[in-house]
Image: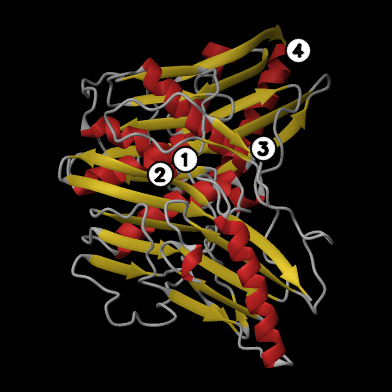
């Protein structure tokens, strides 16, 4: 496997390191290679791409469509009900990926529907076209009191919702509502994959309504699911209002800022790409955040073609935010450094570094970048003395950490930061960190292809929040400082 292939494997390893486990999910129905004949083998490139599929589902949107790979591709459509909250949506899609691959272990084209989401993937393009096969339906066997009036109201409700959903945008094509008969109130929901245009969505739903007579005639509840659209109705409410992230169009991509300072002589290298893509200035506020908490270090590959990886999140960053930051950093860093084997990037919550050279167990202070708050302290000499004392104290505390965590925060009675590959610090006159996360941390994995250790360590951080809580008065400033466990970093301060 080449260097690029190992970087792809990195995405799936990050998910494993964060302890993401899959829960049992119940599909309404699923299909493997419906009227199609294409299979993949164990350890093939297609399988490796499927391994990384969850790492692409990082935003709060209810719809995801993306392609993994280049020559051999995996086309993916992932759709949640627009009223399902982002965390539940993400869990549903990740669990669906695991379950679908269990049910369809070698088929290249598979689809599964559950109550909250649908996942579909294939080796052939599936975007921007109406697909009504395969499909499935389910119903409540209880009959309505007056079948004919009930059927008419169901169809009127669904037609009304079709008009609303098909008029949606590229982010959401979803509608819910209710109508009443003399005996019951009927609640309905319809949805299309947002890659369809309005007429495609409308036509898909009309074709799904055609199954009403066969599946659900007079029944008090029913649903039909298709790859491109679905509907459901019940006599009890079963949906919520669409969540904000599902309704709002996606924000435009943030501009990539250049490094705050150019690398000094000797920092660069022939195969090195120095990238700092999340430091931005806004008036007098410096909005970049430092990297402060080690997640893992590991090696991918064997013989001479290896990728050595260090992935570090701030100690106060929650696990799901850490996961998203590292997965996004891997994608962004490969975009900014498409050919370089030695790359590093710092963002708001994490640092990612990889190389074909050994980078473990040694202090690395180049490349580096710094940032500062331009506001001057009232008493510069006194301020600098207090600052140095604080940093010295935190250096001692962080250096006494273990192989899982070298991180310290604290405050004393305007702002600055320095980022290096092996350590970093930041200080401000306002609180900018949370309490250190309590988490389950697994040891770094063995190289790909070997057996991973069985033991799992649970640690309780020794770092305590300031006595007055997270916040501080304006005349106090607060610090975070951390070091990668493999290096004796603190001695360099």
Which is more toward the observer, 440 or 121? 440
Q: Nearer the viewer, mark 2 or mark 4?
A: 2
Residue under label 3: 176
Residue under label 4: 146
User: What kind of element bears circle 1?
Assistant: loop
Q: Is residue 264 left or right of residue 140?
A: left
| Badge 3 density bin: few <14, some 14–19, many ≥20, Cα 10 Å | many
Q: Residue 221 got which mark?
A: none
Which is more toward the observer, 351 or 231? 351
Q: Are dots 4 and 1 in contact, CB under 8 Å?
A: no
Residue under label 1: 193
Q: Earlier in the sequence, mark 2 or mark 4?
A: 2
Q: Earlier in the sequence, mark 4 or mark 1?
A: 4
User: What kind of element bears circle 3?
Assistant: strand
Q: Is residue 252 above or below residue 20?
A: below
Which is more toward the observer, 14 or 218? 14
Q: Are dots 1 and 2 in contact, CB under 8 Å?
A: yes
Q: Earlier in the sequence, mark 3 or mark 2?
A: 2
| Badge 1 density bin: few <14, some 14–19, many ≥20, Cα 10 Å | many
Q: Earlier in the sequence, mark 1 or mark 2?
A: 2
Q: Quadrant of the N terminus?
A: top left
Q: Is residue 100 left or right of residue 37?
A: right
Q: Nearer the viewer, mark 3 or mark 2?
A: 2
Q: Nearer the viewer, mark 3 or mark 1?
A: 1
| Badge 4 density bin: few <14, some 14–19, many ≥20, Cα 10 Å | few
């Amino acid at each position: 496997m080449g260097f690029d292939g190992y970087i792809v494997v990195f995405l799936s390893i990050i998910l494993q390191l964060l302890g993401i486990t899959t829960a049992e999910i119940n599909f309404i129905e699923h299909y493997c290679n419906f009227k199609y004949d294409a299979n993949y083998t164990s350890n093939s490139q297609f399988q490796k791409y499927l391994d990384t599929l969850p790492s692409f589902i990082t935003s709060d949107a209810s719809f995801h469509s993306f392609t993994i790979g280049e020559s051999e591709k995996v086309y993916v459509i992932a759709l949640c009900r627009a009223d399902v909250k982002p965390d539940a949506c993400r869990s549903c899609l990740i669990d669906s990926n695991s379950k679908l691959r269990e049910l369809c272990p070698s088929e290249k084209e598979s689809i599964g529907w559950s109550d909250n989401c649908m996942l579909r993937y294939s080796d052939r393009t599936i975007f921007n076209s109406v697909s009504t096969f395969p499909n499935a339906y389910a119903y409540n066997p209880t009959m309505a009191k007056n079948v004919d009036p009930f059927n008419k109201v169901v169809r009127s409700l669904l037609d009304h919702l079709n008009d609303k959903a098909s008029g949606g945008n590229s982010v959401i094509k979803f509608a819910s509502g209710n109508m009443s008969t003399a005996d019951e109130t009927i609640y309905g929901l319809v949805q299309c994959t947002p890659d369809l245009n309005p007429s495609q969505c409308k036509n898909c739903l009309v074709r799904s309504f055609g199954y009403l007579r066969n599946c659900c005639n007079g029944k008090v509840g029913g649903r039909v699911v298709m790859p491109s659209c679905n509907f459901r109705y019940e006599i009890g409410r079963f949906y919520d209002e669409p969540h904000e992230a599902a309704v709002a169009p996606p924000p435009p991509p943030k501009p990539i800022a250049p490094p705050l300072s150019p690398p000094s002589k000797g920092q660069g290298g022939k195969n090195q790409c120095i990238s700092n893509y999340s430091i931005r200035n806004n008036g007098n506020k410096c909005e970049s955040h430092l990297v402060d908490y080690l997640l893992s270090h590991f090696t991918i590959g064997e013989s001479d073609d290896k990728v050595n990886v260090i992935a570090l999140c701030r100690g106060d960053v929650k696990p799901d935010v850490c996961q998203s930051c590292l997965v996004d950093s891997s994608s962004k860093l490969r975009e900014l450094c498409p050919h370089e084997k030695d790359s590093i990037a710092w963002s708001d919550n994490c640092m990612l570094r990889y190389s074909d050279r050994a980078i473990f167990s040694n202090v690395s202070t180049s490349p580096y970048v710094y940032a500062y708050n331009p506001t001057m302290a009232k008493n510069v000499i006194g301020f600098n003395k207090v600052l140095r004392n604080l940093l010295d104290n935190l250096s001692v505390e962080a250096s006494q950490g273990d192989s899982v965590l070298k991180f310290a925060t604290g405050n004393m009675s305007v702002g600055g930061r320095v980022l290096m590959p092996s350590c970093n610090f930041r200080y401000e006159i306002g609180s900018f960190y949370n309490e250190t996360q309590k988490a389950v941390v697994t040891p770094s994995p063995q190289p790909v292809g070997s057996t991973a250790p069985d033991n799992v360590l649970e640690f309780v951080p020794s770092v305590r929040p300031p006595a007055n809580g997270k916040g501080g008065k304006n005349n106090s400033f607060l610090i975070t400082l951390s070091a990668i466990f493999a290096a004796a970093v603190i001695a360099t301060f």
